Amino acid sequence: MGKSSGSGMAIDVPVKSWGIYVGLIGDRVKHIVLAQNSFRYSDGLFDLDYTAVPLSWAVDVSVLVKEHIPKDAASRLVNSFMMGGHRAFNRPRTFRRSLAQRRLSVDGRPD
């Protein structure tokens, strides 16, 4: 059950999310992390979107396809996600986006 960002009221909103399971991540609050929406830009860069669902919000979990991608590609997804949350550069936003896209083109691309 999520909370409205403005009112603090609990709102029960059923949502179905699916993607490639990346892991259960978080020290204080555990989140189910899914890789979703993989696409390649016209200039050859590759990008992935991730969704993090608080574990306490999960009602049911189903595996649709086991081992959908090779193990080495799955490892790159985890590495890409873990690197994405750490910004070492204090640069303009466009530079950070470009840097992240270059990194994902090497680390996050399934074969």
Image (tube, grey):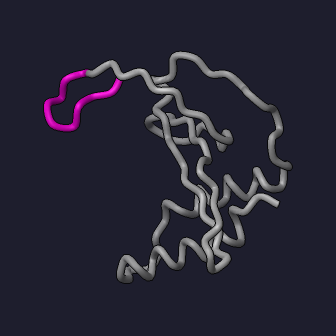
Q: Residue at the front extreme?
A: 42
User: Left or right of 7: which side holds 106?
Assistant: right
Q: Where is residue 45 in the image (x, y as percent from the top left)?
A: 64, 74
Q: State the residue in front, 7 or 25.
A: 7
Say which quadrant the C terminus sits in.
Answer: bottom right
Quarter of the figure with residue 100: bottom right
Q: Where is residue 20 in the image (x, y as percent from the top left)?
A: 68, 42
Residue at image position (67%, 22%) is 62
Residue at image position (46%, 70%) is 87
Q: Would you say the magenta stretch is mainly helix, strand or loop?
A: loop
Above or below, 6 relative to 87 = above
Residue at image position (45%, 26%) is 15
Say which quadrant the N terminus sits in.
Answer: top left
Above or below, 57 relative to 70 = above
Quarter of the figure with residue 10: top left
Q: How many labels does the image show?
A: 0
Q: Is residue 9 found inside the magenta-colored segment of the image?
A: yes
Residue at image position (72%, 63%) is 109
User: Left or right of 70: which side holds 85?
Assistant: left
Q: State the residue in front, 37 or 55.
A: 37
Part of the protein shown in magenta: 1-10
Q: Residue at the left extreme?
A: 7
Q: Where is residue 101 in the image (x, y as percent from the top left)?
A: 57, 72
